């Protein structure tokens, strides 16, 4: 691998001198950019602001991954292109350095994260500096810097003050190995995404943000955003809107309420009577609801369970508590337990039994369902297993009220049967009519349900910003006053989590004992730290205001620079990071801190790169280390090659052999500029091709079609240097500007070599002349003696004699025309047939 130290030696153009030396060129320009502040946008006054945002990396100990550089380069090209359009471009980058990844790695190597992270960041910075990014490093952020997380804590307090942050005991996925709570998305097949340990369920007191309250807005706004379609769809699915009904079932005591089966729905519900509320999307099937099922954690379970059933119910609940939430949703043999309680079906007045089963989740809907086994697959399975009644209330084509079920529920469309006065109605109409009837007797109401859960931001870990809350025996929960921020994360040696389910900070009384801000009595700090997704949910607001230490974000700068113009990042963040960022922006707008509610006007998801057809992984040893390639080929070639791999939004396959072709292209451009002349006139055909290339690259780059833009420039180089012709300055100078976003160092070098004042990025993107795009020449296929021998370029209105003369003179096809042709036929615009 990578033994080719002299790329030009195998370039296939032996007549060309050796190419340029990227090491010299690139370090020279990096130094000049730093000296001149080329990458620092004038944030206060720059005209036509353009905020180009890329997802900030987690600074791992392994260093920059080629996937990071792929994403950053794609973003950088877009940003540099905008700059060449004359816009003031702000391209910041920082580090997302808190969180469990850093902490677990620190534990593994036995280095404290406070030592490890600065070291990792220094290494990332070294690597990023070589990558040729137009990053304004004077506006970088590091989420672990108290000067940054002071404002993360401030964000928490804003939500707290508005009642959008609250604490509750919740069933959570618990990884016994990582000793932390996991989001549902972090549980894969019942196992921890990070370590593969089987996940358990625990009940913990946690801080939550009320993102669920924003579900309708988060959903509706998607229609107005210019985002990748796949990202928007992922968000819609995650929000999970469904229209349905909330229905009420009275729980009755069958002994006390003897004859309750005859009690029809009453509008009066007794105060002491437990009411089970269920959410259903099929209120039309209520006549077929033959039992209710509660989630094992449902708060009414204790109250309704009969004495005879209590032992069995308790042991079932204990078993369910051990499972993680994902396993419970998977298809498997149904289990459950009868509670001994009965409820009244509000439509039929019938007494139906109340069960508990783990296939019902507390976190969805109300944690209780009405089971309609005739028309729901899971309910059918459950009812069959436990011998519960199955009633048909929907009849499809050719079916009627007595049609038997053939071993499965009927889930198709049809008309209502066995449903009293609603018989004969279609499913959709019945939904409305049934709900009208039920609301009239307070038996239920139409509701819209969302799957989006509140955001659990508590982490029982060390490596995060402490949640700024103090608990006082007298005053209760007291927020830390803003002027006391930041609550600094203390340096403690024993940062390893234990099995207690509380943060390691809870072992440090000297830290958590603090006076109550309200009454001054000794009180206790919250010892949970916040989720790393909170750090990254607002970082884009901070970049322009870095240096303004008295505010989270400066009003004027925020007005000028936000919302973000273009955000480019990975689709793996489609639901967590991007949703949380939108939510926080909405909240901060509602609180009057911002005057927009969507943070990212445009979002584009990039693809992934693989290597030699396989996913890169450390275990396979096929990870591309950017340092090695930049050492050998230079950053310009590496960048351009990464973008040449495939469509940016799809990704591509990295192959070592491919990069030399890109270097050869840059070498040829370099040689063409070095040797170009200003005497005489540029060639008309070459200039036509140039204008077509300018047009194409100018269309492809903003469409993120980088690979086709590069291909077009390479194709142009072939035209420009056909037969190793010397080229005119006018034919090559605009190519330097076209290539600049991709290969910024060599472009600067060539721009200077051409004697231009100022840098190439202060020039303007070249224009093209539309009238030049119409070609006067056409290509004609030449057949000699019935065999196709090649193509020649001729004028559109060429005569047959001129076409023959051109073919005879052509180096490729001419040698086949031996002697005087017997016959010559020109098919205008297509074919020249020479019969010998
Ligand atoms: Zn784990
Ligand atoms: Zn107090």
Image (tube, grey):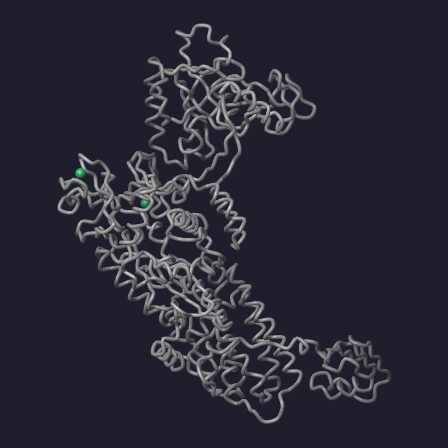
Query: How many marks overall?
Result: 0
| Residue at 44 percent of width and 42 percent of height | 214
Residue 477, x across and y down, in percent: 24, 38
Q: Quadrant of residue 414?
A: top right
Which is nearer the eye, 122 or 345? 345
Residue 407, x across and y down, in percent: 58, 24
Q: Is residue 675 above or below residue 568?
A: below
Quadrant of the image for the C terminus?
Answer: bottom right
Which is nearer the eye, 392 or 167? 167
Q: Quadrant of residue 97?
A: bottom left
Quarter containing ligand 2?
A: top left
Q: Quadrant of residue 285?
A: top right
| Residue at 30 percent of width and 62 percent of height | 548
Q: Residue furthest top?
A: 258
Q: Is residue 828 left or right of residue 208?
A: right
Residue 617, x across and y down, in percent: 40, 57
Q: Residue furthest bottom?
A: 679
Q: Is residue 657 visible?
A: no
Q: Is residue 508 left or right of residue 82?
A: left
Q: Is residue 804 visible?
A: yes
Q: Is residue 332 above or below residue 648?
A: above
Q: Is residue 81 above or below residue 749?
A: above
Quadrant of the image for the N terminus?
Answer: bottom left
| Residue at 42 percent of width and 22 percent of height | 276
Residue 499, x across and y down, in percent: 23, 40
């Amino acid at each position: 691998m990578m033994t080719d130290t002299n790329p030009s030696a195998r370039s296939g153009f032996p007549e060309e001198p050796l190419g340029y030396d990227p090491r010299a060129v690139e370090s020279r320009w990096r130094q000049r950019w730093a000296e001149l502040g080329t990458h620092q946008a004038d944030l206060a006054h720059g005209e036509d602001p353009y905020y180009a945002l890329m997802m900030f990396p987690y600074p791992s100990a392994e260093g920059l991954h080629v996937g990071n550089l792929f994403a950053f380069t794609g973003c950088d090209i877009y940003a540099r292109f905008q700059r060449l359009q004359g816009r003031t471009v702000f391209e910041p980058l920082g580090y997302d350095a808190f969180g469990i990844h850093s902490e677990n790695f620190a534990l593994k190597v036995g280095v404290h994260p406070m030592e490890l992270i600065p070291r990792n960041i220094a290494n990332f910075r070294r690597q990023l500096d070589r990558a040729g990014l137009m990053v304004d490093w004077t506006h970088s952020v590091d989420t672990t810097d108290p000067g940054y997380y002071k404002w993360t804590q401030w964000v928490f307090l804003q939500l707290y003050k508005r009642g959008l942050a609250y604490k509750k005991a919740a069933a959570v996925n618990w990884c016994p190995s990582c000793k932390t709570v996991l989001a549902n998305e972090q549980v894969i097949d019942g196992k921890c995404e990070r370590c593969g340990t089987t996940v358990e369920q625990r009940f913990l007191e946690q801080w939550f943000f009320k993102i669920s309250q924003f579900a309708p807005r988060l959903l509706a706004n998607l229609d107005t955003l210019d985002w990748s379609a796949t990202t928007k769809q992922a968000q819609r699915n995650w929000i999970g809107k469904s229209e349905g009904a909330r229905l009420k079932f009275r729980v009755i005591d069958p002994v006390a309420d003897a004859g309750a089966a005859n009690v029809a729905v009453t509008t009066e519900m007794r105060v002491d009577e437990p009411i089970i509320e269920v959410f259903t999307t099929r209120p039309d099937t209520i006549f077929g609801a033959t039992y209710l099922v509660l989630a094992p954690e449902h708060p009414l379970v204790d109250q309704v369970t009969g004495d005879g059933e209590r032992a069995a119910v308790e042991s079932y609940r204990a078993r369910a508590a051990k499972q993680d939430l994902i396993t419970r949703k998977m298809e498997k043999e149904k289990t459950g337990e009868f509670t001994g309680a009965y409820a009244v079906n509000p439509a039929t007045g019938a007494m139906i039994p109340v069960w508990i089963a783990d296939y019902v989740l507390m976190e969805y809907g109300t944690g209780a369902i009405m089971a309609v086994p005739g028309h729901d697959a899971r309910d059918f399975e459950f009812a069959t297993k436990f011998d519960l009644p199955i009633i048909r209330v929907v009849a499809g084509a050719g079916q009627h009220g007595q049609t038997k079920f053939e071993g499965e529920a009927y889930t198709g469309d049809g008309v209502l049967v066995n449903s009293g006065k609603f018989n004969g109605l279609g499913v959709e109409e019945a939904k409305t009519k049934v709900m009208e009837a039920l609301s009239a007797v307070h038996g239920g109401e139409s509701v819209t349900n969302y799957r989006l859960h509140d955001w659990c931001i508590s982490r029982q870990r060390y490596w995060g910003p402490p949640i700024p809350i103090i608990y006082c025996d007298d005053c209760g929960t007291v927020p830390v006053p803003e002027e006391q921020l930041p609550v600094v994360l203390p340096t403690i040696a024993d940062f390893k989590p234990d099995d207690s389910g509380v943060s390691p900070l809870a072992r440090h009384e000297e830290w958590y004992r603090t006076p109550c801000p309200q009454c001054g009595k000794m009180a206790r700090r919250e010892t949970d730290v916040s989720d790393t997704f909170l750090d990254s949910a607002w970082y884009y607001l901070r970049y322009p205001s870095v240096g303004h230490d008295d505010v989270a974000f400066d009003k004027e700068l925020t007005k000028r620079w936000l919302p973000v113009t273009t955000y480019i990042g990975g689709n793996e963040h489609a639901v967590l990071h991007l949703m949380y960022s939108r939510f926080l922006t909405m909240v901060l707008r509602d609180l009057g801190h911002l005057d927009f509610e969507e943070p990212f006007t445009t979002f584009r998801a990039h693809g992934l790169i693989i290597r030699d057809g396989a996913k890169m992984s450390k275990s396979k040893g096929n990870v591309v280390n950017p340092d090695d390639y930049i050492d050998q080929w230079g950053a310009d070639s590496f960048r351009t090659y990464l973008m040449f791999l495939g469509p940016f939004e799809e990704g591509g396959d990295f192959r070592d052999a491919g990069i030399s072709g890109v270097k050869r292209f840059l070498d040829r451009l370099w040689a063409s500029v070095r040797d170009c002349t200003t005497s005489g006139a540029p060639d008309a055909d070459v200039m036509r091709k140039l204008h077509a290339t300018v047009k194409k690259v100018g269309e492809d780059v903003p469409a993120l079609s980088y690979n086709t833009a590069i291909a077009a420039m390479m194709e142009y180089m072939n035209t420009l240097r056909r037969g190793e012709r010397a080229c005119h300055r006018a034919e090559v100078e605009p190519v330097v500007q076209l290539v600049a976003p991709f290969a910024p160092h060599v472009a600067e070098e060539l721009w200077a070599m051409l004697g231009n004042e100022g840098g190439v990025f202060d020039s303007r993107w070249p224009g093209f002349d539309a009238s030049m795009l119409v070609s006067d020449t056409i290509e004609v296929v030449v057949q000699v003696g019935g065999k196709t021998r090649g193509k020649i370029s001729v004028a559109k209105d060429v005569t047959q004699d001129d076409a023959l003369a051109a073919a005879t003179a052509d180096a490729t096809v001419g040698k086949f025309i031996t002697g005087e042709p017997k016959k010559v036929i020109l098919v205008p615009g297509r074919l020249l047939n020479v019969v010998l």
